[in-house]
Image (tube, helix red, strand yellow):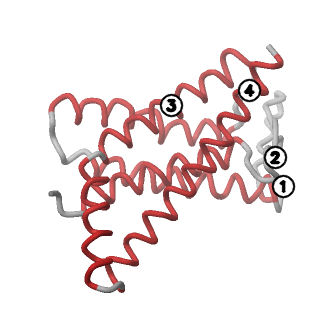
């Protein structure tokens, strides 16, 4: 089980880093559309349009994989979620259903709900990461009955990737996908 956990930590951490790179590429493309030369604007706009077309599917896959990984960590590996992790799950889990139904029914109005859920979830995950990494005193204390401390880091990969960073990246990725769906003109 130990090698499975290590492999999942590495996979999740690499996926987190690739997700962060993807968000930065989207920001660079948007800046190119906004401030670039006409040929660069056209190319960047075309790429963003294609990504916007796949935004619901991408958001659904990010949410589904994130839910699966969180359940594996808690129910198979045995990492007990803290209070902030539970709150983040409240904002993540419904998105699998919302986006799954949106894909099935081929409707495009689900992005507003996922934008709201992901934005709130990202703020909570960002606060959790900040507390774990820089100010553990800012995090909620353990329960009197012995709950898991929000400051507990089960692992740290590549110097900064923790479970709250994975969560933050997933929320930002879903937000990015939903913004692409909502605001980028389709081909």
Q: Which numbered tag is attached to residue 136?
A: 1
- Where residue 11 sits in the image (x, y, percent)? 66, 34
- Where residue 66 sits in the image (x, y, percent)? 53, 34
Quadrant of the drawing holding the C terminus: bottom left
Closer to the chain start, of discs 4 and 1, is 4
Closer to the chain start, of discs 2 and 4, is 4
Closer to the chain start, of discs 1 and 3, is 3
Q: Residue at x 33, y 81 (%)?
A: 34
| Element marked by disc 2 | loop
Query: What residue is disc 2 on?
Result: 151
- Where residue 100 sits in the image (x, y, percent)? 30, 30
- Where residue 94 sits in the image (x, y, percent)? 40, 34
Give the Cα distance between marks 4 and 1. Answer: 27 Å
Given contact means CB atoms under 8 Å apart, are the residues at marks 3 and 4 in contact? no
Q: Residue at x 73, y 35 (%)?
A: 10
In the image, which is nearer the foreground, mark 3 or mark 4?
4
Q: Say whether residue 20 is left or right of residue 52.
A: right
Identify the image quadrant of residue 104. Answer: top left
Q: Which numbered tag is attached to residue 65?
A: 3
Q: Which numbered tag is attached to residue 66?
A: none
| Element marked by disc 3 | helix
Identify the image quadrant of residue 26. Answer: bottom left
């Amino acid at each position: 089980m130990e090698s499975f956990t290590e492999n999942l930590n590495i996979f999740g951490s690499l996926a987190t880093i690739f997700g962060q790179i993807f968000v930065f590429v989207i920001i660079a493309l948007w800046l190119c559309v906004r401030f670039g030369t006409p040929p660069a604007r056209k190319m960047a706009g075309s790429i963003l349009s294609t990504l916007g077309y796949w935004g619901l599917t991408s958001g659904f896959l990010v949410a589904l994989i994130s839910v699966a990984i969180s359940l594996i960590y808690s129910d198979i590996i045995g990492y007990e979620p803290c209070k902030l992790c539970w709150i983040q799950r409240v904002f993540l889990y419904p998105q699998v259903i919302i986006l799954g139904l949106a894909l099935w029914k081929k409707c495009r109005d689900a992005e507003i709900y996922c934008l709201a859920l992901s934005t709130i979830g990202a703020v909570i995950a960002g606060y959790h990461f900040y507390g774990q990494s820089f100010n553990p005193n800012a995090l909620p204390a353990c329960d009197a009955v012995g709950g898991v401390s929000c400051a507990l880091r089960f692992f740290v990969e590549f110097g900064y990737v923790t479970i709250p960073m994975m969560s933050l990246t997933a929320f930002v990725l879903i937000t990015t996908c939903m913004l692409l769906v909502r605001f980028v003109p389709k081909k």
